Image (cartoon, grey):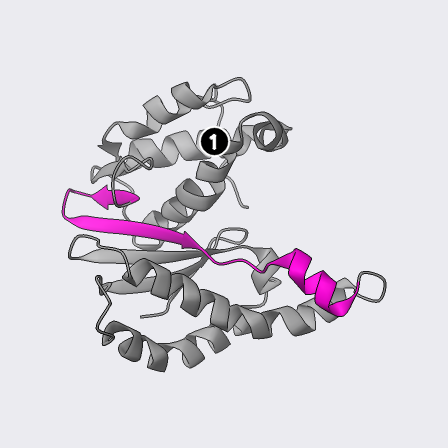
Amino acid sequence: MNSTIRDDEPIITSSTSTAEFEKIFSKEMSAEEFINIFENYENYSKSNALEVMQKEHSRIFKCFTDELAPLETFLKYRNIIGTERIRIGMKELRWDAYINNEKYIEITVAELPKESFYRKHGYDNINRFILARKAPTFMKDIIINRIIEKTEKEYPENTTLLVRLTDRETFEVDTHMEKWISEIRPIISDIFSRPKIKSKFSEIFLIDISRNVTMKLY
């Protein structure tokens, strides 16, 4: 993940408790302030902070990778980097974030179930090349299922859905994301027309947080 080099002391460190972390990100702040906190920690994580967080503070690590990273990437993609007001849901609210109390953001994670993949294809004869060839074919259905799961829940009108990916799913190949988009777009209208659907998102984006790549799906 690309980072901005910052000289100031990190607000989030490997010693930050879960309660302290949630307090920092539960308050409303400007987009600039949110990005500064995120980049500040992102720079610090060049050492072992992310590793420590993953081992000792799994709630923080999950929030960092599943919610904050895709949100930060999306804000920069939309050039929302100034005085716009940002509030993170922090699992206490039914949305993951809002912008200026009028644009709501929901974030979901689409990732390959690696263990079941290895069991199916074998541990001994599988390698990264084979995985890179086969894994993208599974991702279209995984992304669709994540979207369906979210549409079955109720969100405010004018909610944007972000689908978080990493280089483990995209293998740093834009054409994988572009292929999923071309195949999934015709399916979304059908999904939104289903009788049990509670939410129809105004926009849907695929976001590879490993490379800070955002592509519009819908």
Q: Where is residue 26 in the image (x, y as percent from the top left)?
A: 29, 29
- For image coordinates 21% across by 44% down, the residue present is 99
Task: Name which quarter of the figure residue 114 lies in.
Answer: bottom right
Residue 153 lies in magenta, yes or no? no
Q: Position of residue 37 (x, y in %)?
A: 39, 29
Q: Position of residue 139 (x, y in %)?
A: 53, 68
Q: Position of residue 186 (x, y in %)?
A: 34, 82
- On the image, numbered disc 1 is attached to which residue? 60
Residue 114 lies in magenta, yes or no? yes
Disc count in the image? Answer: 1
- For image coordinates 44% across by 80% down, the residue present is 183
Looking at the image, is 191 positioned above or below residue 86?
below
Task: Name which quarter of the figure residue 77 lies in.
Answer: bottom left
Name the foreground residue: 192 vs 54: 192
Looking at the rendering, the stretch of residues picked out in magenta corresponds to 96-122
- For image coordinates 28% across by 61% down, the residue present is 152
Q: What amino acid is at disc 1?
A: Ile
